[in-house]
Image: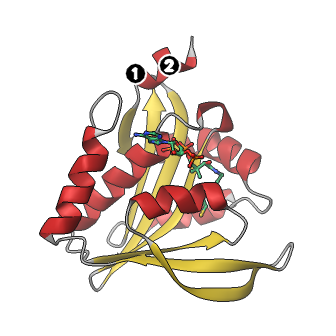
Amino acid sequence: MKRSALVADVIVVPMRKRHLTQVMRIEAKVYPRPWSLGIFLSELNLTDSRHYYVAQSGRKVVGYCGMMTAVGEGHITNIAVDPEFWGIQVATRLLVNAFEVGLRTGVKDMTLEVRASNSRAQRLYFRFGFVPVGVRKSYYKENNEDAIVMWTYNIDSPSFEARLLEIKEGLNVGEITGNS
Ligand SMILES: CC(C)(COP(=O)(O)OP(=O)(O)OC[C@H]1O[C@@H](n2cnc3c(N)ncnc32)[C@H](O)[C@@H]1OP(=O)(O)O)[C@@H](O)C(=O)NCCC(=O)NCCS
């Protein structure tokens, strides 16, 4: 199937254990130190504070995103897309969903860490209003790379709602179907 045809069918649904084989395959493709199965399982067990979703086309998992929430803050713990599906807004859709889940669960501010060299991911985050606020030195141990800490604030404000709506309207296909 063509990539463009595939993305037309993409939906965002809660991550379940049955997705993990495919999730871990993507994880191994995109990260030098992929999360283990144990990490994903323990995250999925923390149902009060963790919100994990996959982007799926049919039965194929093409990306995923996790968020931890506490005291009005949302922390994006992981977001990745199968490289074969980069650049067709899968991550954008996953982030829109994460913000919507965050808003439903009382999140006001969102944060994440990103590699200093990962300008592609940083451009994605800028579109969602994330700004760099600090650096964690040598956070990524395998190459001593710094992490940039990014935050986006007041996601429940009218101006942020307008930003989110604009991003949603720019999505080329389909509907965000995440529901927790
Ligand atoms: C970073 C990552 C998640 C992005 O996933 P993606 O699905 O390709 O992202 P999207 O398609 O939603 O958006 C990214 C690209 O599409 C373009 N795009 C998205 N929506 C667009 C729109 N409406 N109009 C024009 N361009 C758009 C963006 O400009 C961007 O391209 P860029 O390289 O010029 O910035 C993916 O590259 C990945 O998995 N990387 C490895 C793991 C990783 O680094 N994760 C982040 C850890 S912090």
Nearest the eye: 33 or 155? 155
Disc 1 to disc 2: CB gap under 8 Å: yes
Picture quarter containing residue 78?
bottom right
Going 59% across and 32% down the picture, which residue do you hit? 85
User: Where residue 104 sits: x, y (%)?
Assistant: 18, 63
Residue type, numbered disc 1: Ala
Going 25% across and 39% down the picture, which residue do you hit? 169
Is 124 on the left or on the right of 8, as rendered? right
In the image, residue 100 above or below residue 138: above
Residue type, numbered disc 2: Ser
Q: What SS does tag 2 mark?
A: helix
Q: Residues within 10 Å of mark 2 (few under 14, many from 20)?
A: few
Nearest the eye: 163 or 98? 163
Q: What SS does tag 1 mark?
A: helix
Nearest the eye: 45 or 155? 155
Going 25% across and 48% down the picture, which residue do you hit? 166
The quarter of the rendered structure image containing the N terminus is top right
Find out if the beta carbon at label 1 lies less than 8 Å from the nearest ligand 1 atom.
no
| Residue carrying label 2 | 4
User: Where residue 113 sits: x, y (%)?
Assistant: 57, 74
In the image, residue 144 above or below residue 6: below
In the image, residue 148 above or below residue 123: below
Mark 1–mark 2 Cα distance, whole angstroms, equals 7 Å
